[in-house]
Image (cartoon, grey):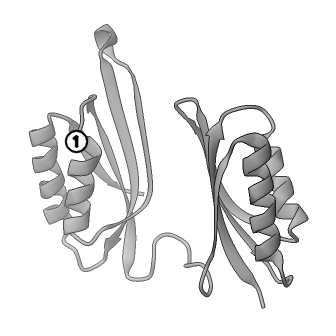
Amino acid sequence: MKRWFILSAIGQDRPGLVAELAQLVYDSDANLEDSRMTILGSDFAVILLASSSTAGCGDRLLLGAKRLERDHGLTILVRGLEGQPRGPVPAPGHVAWRVRAAGADKAGIVAGLCRVLAEHQVNIADLATQSRPGEGGSPHYEMTVTAEVPERLDVGVLRKALEEAADRLVIDVVLERA
C-alpha cells in the first residue's frame, strides 16, 4: 500500500540543502512527488510531498530528518498523510481564479484580502507575495493567489468584496480566470 508523507524544512540558506533533502527522500525508499522551495529572508524553506510503498519509510524519513537537523541546523517536520492526496486544482465543483494585488507595502494586505476569500468560501491553493523597491524607493508589495472559487458563487459578488477591501487598503486588485 502506498503511503504519503509531507516534509517541511527551514534553515539558513546554503548550497547543497536541496541535495541533502532529496537524498533523504531517496535513501528512505520514497519518491519525491511534488515540492515547493524558496529563499525567504536569509533562510531556505521547502515543503515536499513524498510517497512510498516500502514498509518503514516513515521511520527512515524521521531518522534521516533528525540527522539533517543535527548536521545542518535545519528545522524539519515529517507528517504522514491519511489516505490519498487530493486531486489537482481546481477541486470538483470549483473554478480556478487568480487574485493579483499590488500597492504600497503595509501591514494587513494579506490578512484583509484572504479574509474576503474565506468569507466567500474560496480556498487558497497557492499564494506568493513579494516586496520590492517601487517608485522613489518606497516599498511596493505584490501578491498573487491561485484560488478555488465555488461554481455556485456569483463572481461579481466576490469581485465587489475584493474591490471594497482594496479600497480600504489603498491597493489595486484584479480577479481573473486562472
Furthest-bottom residue in this view: 1
| Vertical side of 63 occupied by 114: above or below | above
120 sits to left or right of 92: left
81 sits to left or right of 121: right
Viewer-proximal residue among 86 and 8: 8
On the rendered image, what quadrant is the N terminus found in?
Answer: bottom right
| Vertical side of 137 occupied by 139: above or below | below
Residue found at x 83% / y 58%: 24
Residue found at x 81% / y 60%: 64
Q: Which residue is mark 1?
A: 108
Task: Report if residue 31 is visible in the image.
Answer: no
Residue 169: x and y in percent read: 15, 38
Residue found at x 83% / y 70%: 60
- Indicate the amino acid at tag 1: Gly
Viewer-proximal residue among 36 and 17: 17
Figure label count = 1
Query: Alpha-carbon neighbours of circle 1 within 10 Å: few (<14), some, or many (≥20)?
Result: few
| Vertical side of 173 occupied by 106: above or below | above
Q: Secondary structure at mark 1?
A: loop
Quadrant of the rendered structure where residue 44 is?
top right
